Amino acid sequence: MAYAYSRMDGLPTQRFLIDTDTASDDAVALVLALREPSITVEVITVVAGNVPLDNAVQNALYTRDLCRSAVPVFAGRAAPLVRPLVTAQFVHGEDGMGDIGLPLHGRAPAAGDAVEVMIETIVGTPREMTLVALGPLTNVAAALAIEPRIAQLVRHCFVMGGAGSGTGNITATAEYNFWADPEAARVVVRSAMPITMVGWDMSVRFAAFGPAEAKELAAVGPLGRFCVDIQAKVDVYAREQSGLAGFDLPDPIAMAVAIEPDIARFEEHHLDVLVGTDRGRDEIDWSDQSGSDQKARITTDVDRTAFLAMLHKACLNGSA
């Protein structure tokens, strides 16, 4: 399988800022990033989404500590820009990590506001910081409202959001992250920030795990077992509601594409997000009829074998 895009540039070590609403799949994405030697995760910012903000912060801190990392974790926005928070705890469990009894409490985030830290980090490292957004785009939109220059100063922004060429996972047409805060998603995609969208369709096609594949990942080591165990609630939901053979991992496949774009194919098209009827639906101008010069990079294909290899490598001989 030949892929058209290579790594973003020749930097020997990529610098990542990860924005997450940490639940079960986000945690696996953090494992991928924190265990990857070709990148340095410099900051983790947290936003409400899959779970309330306090839960998401604790989940991020627990996962970071599990990976024996000292990356600072900052708490951000506790609700969407203009709407009440609607979590996805019915998918991920009340604690967001499968309700398997993990000690997800007692850890303190770093002092400071995630939005301010996001701005300071990107402005202080012009065109060097890759932003990977795994949750609703509330923190990113808030940062753009305060400092619009970050749209030009970020190296690239990889967004796990949208349904792409598939159907939605929260409504018939919308993916959860865009649906949870569609106003924020619209701000970000209209900001002229260089964006690669990795939609939920990529997860359904290339990151779904049936029982045999889950067993193989769990057998890799303690981190592999952690990554599988925390999908307990998602696995049931996926089989009973989504029609999949087992849990899928949208945030990890987005993280894998961010770490190594060589594993994916992309097309560049104008992207927008609806905020009224069909709330959160991504509008992709596949035929380029709009004539817009502002285009996002849409992920259309991912090498599943390469993704699985990255995930297994990250979990190999890991702590837990």
Image (spheres, rainbow, N blue to C red):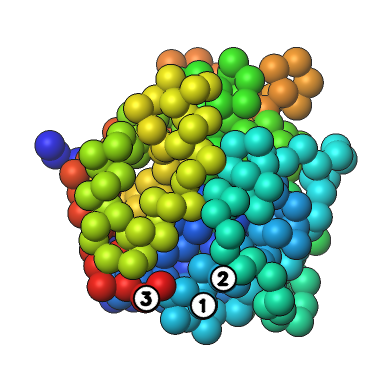
Whole-percent x, y for residue 100 in the image: 55, 54
> Is the residue 281 above or below the residue 212 in the image?
above
Q: Residue at x 77, y 72 (%)?
A: 113
What amino acid is found at the position of numbered circle 2 in the picture?
Tyr
Reading the image, the residue beneath label 2 is 62
Q: Residue at x 63, y 20 (%)?
A: 171
Residues tagged 2 and 3 counted as in contact (Cβ below 8 A)? no
Label 1: which secondary element: helix
Q: Quadrant of the N terminus?
A: top left
Cα separation between marks 2 and 1: 5 Å
What amino acid is found at the position of numbered circle 1 in the picture?
Asp
Reading the image, the residue beneath label 1 is 65
Whole-percent x, y for residue 14 in the image: 38, 71
Label 2: which secondary element: helix
What amino acid is found at the position of numbered circle 3 in the picture?
Ser
* Label 3 packing within 10 angstroms: few (<14), some (14-19), many (20+): some
Q: Image quadrant of residue 22?
A: bottom right
